[in-house]
Image: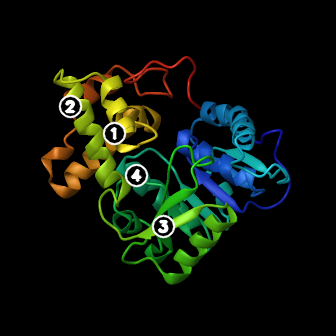
């Protein structure tokens, strides 16, 4: 499927997955004049992305987070992974399920040229585990963007044990071109951010589950006492509670730490389809759906 905002020319960046993060990363690239091929198996997700990206661009520019003077870049949407073969970098942003990520990394790495960096936006799965499914493990790097990536500048970059210097340098150069600030860390379940954050969200939800405090009280304490701009439960709603549960399970399975077992309240909300901002309800209700 070609969109009416596609421009001729080879893609520079391929983004795999048109969910919240994939669309946000595509918005970031578009805002800096980088052409994008956005891939998803769902036509409806791609159609939504075509409408969402211009709105996100306007929001980011209104807040001064993206340059107003950047020339419009080409956006192509497709359901065929073969259309990314000429990409100069690939960002994987599919759902946080190990089997799904393994499958797409194996397929895309067999299509692209050797030396093309393959970036995983995984929240918690170790990069070396994912690299083991790629045709060339040395080309795989982690780049954990925060949500929304077009507003938050800092990116947690993960170097796996087999990541090459060339791949890491290429990814750091790409992030610099996107005006992102990179912080490079080592590999391991959850890396830094989610090894800590997901545990905090889980415990905050458990406090609510036990009747100790309301979601509003938990978040007010984190903001008022600790200086956080957003409390843990509002952050969980922003991430997506389905993604929180998936990440907690990854951490539980790979660390053996029972503290990462998703609490009953989180599981109940996910079963009910209350994922947070993207569905209009999580720990809080939202007037409009978050793209």
Visible in this render: residue 97? yes
Q: Badge 3 local density, few (<14 within 10 Å), some, or many (20+)?
A: few
Q: Find the distance from the CA under tag 4 to the CA under tag 2.
A: 21 Å
**Residue at the disc numbered 2:** 206
In the picture of the structure, the residue carrying the numbered disc 4 is: 123
Side (left or right) of 152 relative to 4: left
Q: Earlier in the sequence, mark 3 or mark 1?
A: 3
| Helix, strand or loop under label 1 | helix
Mark closest to the chain's N terminus, 2 or 3: 3
Residue identified by numbered label 3: 183
Q: Position of residue 221 (x, y in %)?
A: 32, 33
Work out whether mark 4 precedes mark 3 in sequence or the reverse, and give the earlier one: 4
Residue that numbered label 1 is attached to: 225
Residue drawn 46% across the image and 35% down it = 238
240 versus 124 height, above or below: above
Mark 3 vs mark 1: in front? 1
| For the residues bearing labels 4 and 3, Cβ distance under 8 angstroms | no
Q: CA distance from mark 4 to mark 3?
A: 15 Å
């Amino acid at each position: 499927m070609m969109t009416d905002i596609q421009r001729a020319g080879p893609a520079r960046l391929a983004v795999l997955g048109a969910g919240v993060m994939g669309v946000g990363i595509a918005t970031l690239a578009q805002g800096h004049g980088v052409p994008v091929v956005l891939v998803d198996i769902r036509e409806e997700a791609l159609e939504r992305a075509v409408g969402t990206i211009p709105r996100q661009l306007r929001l980011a520019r209104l807040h001064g987070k993206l340059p107003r003077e950047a020339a419009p870049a080409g956006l192509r949407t497709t359901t065929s992974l073969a259309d990314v073969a000429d990409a100069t970098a690939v960002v994987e942003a599919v759902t946080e399920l190990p089997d799904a990520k393994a499958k797409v990394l194996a397929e895309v790495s067999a299509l692209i040229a050797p030396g093309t960096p393959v970036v995983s936006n995984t929240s918690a799965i170790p990069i070396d585990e994912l690299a083991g499914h790629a045709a060339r493990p040395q080309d795989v790097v982690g780049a954990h963007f925060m949500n929304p990536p077009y507003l938050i500048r800092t990116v947690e970059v993960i170097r796996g044990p087999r990541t090459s210097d060339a791949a890491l340098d290429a990814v750091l150069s790409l992030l610099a071109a996107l005006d992102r600030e990179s912080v490079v860390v080592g590999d391991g379940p959850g890396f830094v951010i989610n090894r800590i954050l997901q545990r905090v969200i889980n415990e905050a939800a458990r406090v609510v589950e036990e009747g100790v405090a309301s979601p509003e009280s938990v978040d007010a304490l984190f903001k008022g006492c600790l200086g956080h701009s957003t409390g843990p439960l509002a952050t969980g709603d922003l991430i997506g509670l389905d993604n929180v549960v998936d990440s907690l399970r990854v951490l539980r399975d790979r660390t053996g730490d029972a503290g990462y077992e998703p609490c009953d309240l989180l599981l109940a909300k996910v079963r009910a389809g209350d994922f947070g901002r993207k569905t209009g309800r999580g720990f809080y209700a939202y007037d409009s759906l978050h793209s």
